Image (tube, rainbow, N blue to C red):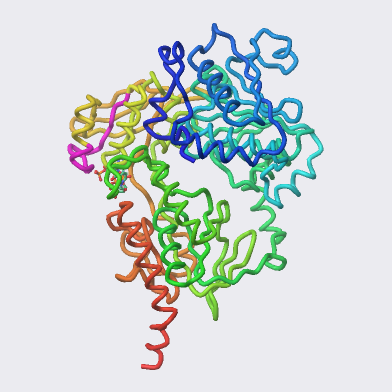
């Protein structure tokens, strides 16, 4: 449902004072029929309670009020109540920020601080439905984990409207609050609308989650890990590593599933591979360690994917995922732990063993670091690799983008568009980005510092305050005050699994494949960024389809058997 998507349109939908004076419909005409039908399935009524104070955040108050009013008009089972911030009801519920939205406060403790702009409108709609149906939305394992909870948990998730990862983390928090309304409260805080609270918790990147004031985690976690951290207040990574080391996660007892093709990674290449595999007559499952979308989902705007003159990366990936889901299951948060190749290709995860005939690795790539002192120390506190996620936090502040490729240009343009005072720093005298993007950067008047490198990222106890830069032409060094550093210096392929399997890599560390995307080991294929090349969405899609078609061909006529008998 493309309601207030994370695109340029949603940035433009940010309420302005004029809109507050003459509110027009927020729910797009195109979505009305779809939403009305969606809400027809509601069972129990759900009350939305909006608290506002006209002296605070007026444009956002108007947005929140209009949205809730429109939802109530749309669905007979939704009611909206409007209370002043100074009311007894506000005191009763401990509400002191305008606008605040409580969902069914008689039944659970779920609230939004700040109007649910952009992506968060979806979590609101989803949560209303879950409340109405009495379903928490948690998976079985997470439900079991939550049953063990004995103490109160107060969860705050800080978000930005254009962050592609935020709604997922908010959904986890809300699902837990629905599952254990007796002990879990969950709050979605829009950092751009409540900068004071974001500052108090040193939010420098989103999603940023704080549990019981003390336990902090950054980024979107798979649901079960979120549940583990909520219950234990310990990092899931550490706990899982401890358990694996102690042999507590045995392969025995895992679900065993037979499938023709396992696809590792749900980016453009993996999703296309799954579609093509199933359309060829094979069964397929996509296992994604994190969330659907890969690098494309983090690209603010894509302008070079044929058929789409201008589309937000996240939106494009949602469309591809929706199409892929019609063919294959996509499991988010299910990373591959081990692969054994014998009679079958056995793929192990923490949840199941997939007994397959082939494996397509489309594990993508991860951002590279510049390696400057301070880069790790201030990650999440001013150092970011995702302008789509974190750009909002630095509106009307100073930021630098480091890099000279397409990502650096796209990020700089996005930041400029948000109102960030951005400068691009590049180590050479020429950019390698497409001319079209370079021209756009010049047209927008984004300053550039060429032949310059960042030698150190400096900051105070909580956040970045400056970068130290060196001019490579004359060797001079100086300090430049900044609030954020967006690093866009390229990607490293995620070849961990490939290396464990012993696949041949090329000189640049990418998985080596033939024209059919076959790797050095029969029945294992690779597609997309992990194989290097042009690293475009169009090439990833091409790779995915090629790999799947090769797998289909090979399973029908195994070339490795022919070679043996030749
Ligand atoms: P990229 O094309 O590899 O560019 C990386 C940039 O970072 C280069 O300018 C490089 O400098 C610089 N760099 C590398 N290491 C550095 C370091 N340690 N310190 C300072 N600078 C450093 O990476 P990308 O821009 O992320 O793009 C990756 C791939 O995705 C490319 O194939 C790109 O075309 C594609 N992509 C496409 C789009 C689009 O078409 N809309 C958008 C994003 C990405 P040098 O130039 O000196 O090597």
Q: Up-down: is 562 above or below 262?
A: below
Q: Nearer the viewer, residue 192 or 276?
A: 276
Q: Does the stretch in magenta take in 436?
A: yes
Whereabouts is ligand 1, in terms of quadrant?
Answer: top left
Image coordinates of residue 83 in percent, x first then y, are 65, 13
Image coordinates of residue 238 in percent, x first then y, are 64, 47
Give the left or right position of residue 258, taking residue 486 as reference: right
- Identity of the residue furthest to the right in this view: 150
User: Number of callouts in the render?
Assistant: 0
Q: Quadrant of residue 473?
A: top left
Tell me the quadrant of the picture where the C terminus can be found: bottom left
Which residues are drawn in magenta? 422-437
Q: Up-down: is 82 above or below 156?
A: above
Give the left or right position of residue 207, taking residue 481 as reference: right
Q: Does the stretch in magenta take in 480?
A: no
Give the left or right position of residue 243, taking residue 458 as reference: right
Residue 374 appears in the rendering: no
Q: Quadrant of residue 429?
A: top left
Q: Up-down: is 212 above or below 562?
A: above
Residue 4 appears in the rendering: yes
Q: Nearer the viewer, residue 185 or 464?
A: 185
Image coordinates of residue 455 in percent, x first then y, are 34, 33
Image coordinates of residue 294 in percent, x first then y, are 43, 49
């Amino acid at each position: 449902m493309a309601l207030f998507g994370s695109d340029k349109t949603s940035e433009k939908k940010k309420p302005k004072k004029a809109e507050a004076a003459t509110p027009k419909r927020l729910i797009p005409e195109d979505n009305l029929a779809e939403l009305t039908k969606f809400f027809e399935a509601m069972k129990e009524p759900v009350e939305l309670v909006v608290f506002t104070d006209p002296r605070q955040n007026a444009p956002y108050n108007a947005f929140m009020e209009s949205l809730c009013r429109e939802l109530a008009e749309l669905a007979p089972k939704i009611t909206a109540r409007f209370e002043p911030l100074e009311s007894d009801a506000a005191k009763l519920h401990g509400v002191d920020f305008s606008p605040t939205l409580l969902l069914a406060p008689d039944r659970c403790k779920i609230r939004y601080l700040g109007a649910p702009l952009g992506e968060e409108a979806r979590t609101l709609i989803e949560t209303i439905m879950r409340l109405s149906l009495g379903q928490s939305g948690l998976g079985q394992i997470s439900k079991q984990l939550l049953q063990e909870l004995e103490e109160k948990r107060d969860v705050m998730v800080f978000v930005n409207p254009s962050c592609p990862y935020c709604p997922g983390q908010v959904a986890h928090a809300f699902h837990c609050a629905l599952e254990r309304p007796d002990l879990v409260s969950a709050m979605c805080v829009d950092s751009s609308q409540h900068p004071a609270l974001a500052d108090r918790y040193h939010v420098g990147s989103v999603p940023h989650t704080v549990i019981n004031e003390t336990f902090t985690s950054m980024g979107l976690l798979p649901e079960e890990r979120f549940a583990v951290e909520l219950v234990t207040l310990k990092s899931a990574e550490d706990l899982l590593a401890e358990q694996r080391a102690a042999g507590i996660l045995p392969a025995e007892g895992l679900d065993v599933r037979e499938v023709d093709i396992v696809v590792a990674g749900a980016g453009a290449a993996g999703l296309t591979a799954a579609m093509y595999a199933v359309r060829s007559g094979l069964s397929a499952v996509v296992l994604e360690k994190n969330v659907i979308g890969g690098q494309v989902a983090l690209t603010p705007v894509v302008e070079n994917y044929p058929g789409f003159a201008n589309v937000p990366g996240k939106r494009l990936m949602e469309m591809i995922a929706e199409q892929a889901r019609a063919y294959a299951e996509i499991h988010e948060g299910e990373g591959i732990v081990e692969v054994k190749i014998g009679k079958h290709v056995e793929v192990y995860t923490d949840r199941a063993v997939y007994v397959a005939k082939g494996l397509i690795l489309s594990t993508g790539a991860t951002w590279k670091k510049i390696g400057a002192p301070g880069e790790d120390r201030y990650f999440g506190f001013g150092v970011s690799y995702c302008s789509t996620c974190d750009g909002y936090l630095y509106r009307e502040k100073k930021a630098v983008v480091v890099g000279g490729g397409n990502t650096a240009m796209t990020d700089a343009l996005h930041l400029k568009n948000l109102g960030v005072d951005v400068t691009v720093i590049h180590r050479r005298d020429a950019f390698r980005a497409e001319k079209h993007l370079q021209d756009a950067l010049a047209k927008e008047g984004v300053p550039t510092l060429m032949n310059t490198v960042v030698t150190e990222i400096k900051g105070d106890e909580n956040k970045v305050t400056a970068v130290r830069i060196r001019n490579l032409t004359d060797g001079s060094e100086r300090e430049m005050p900044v609030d954020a550093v967006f690093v866009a210096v390229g990607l490293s392929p995620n070849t961990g699994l490939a290396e464990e399997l012993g696949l041949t890599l090329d000189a640049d560390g990418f998985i080596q494949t033939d024209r059919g995307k076959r790797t050095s080991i029969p029945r294992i294929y690779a597609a997309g960024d992990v194989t290097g090349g042009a690293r475009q969405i169009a090439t990833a899609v091409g790779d995915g389809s090629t790999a799947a078609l090769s797998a289909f061909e090979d399973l029908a006529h195994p070339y490795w058997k022919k070679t043996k008998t030749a």
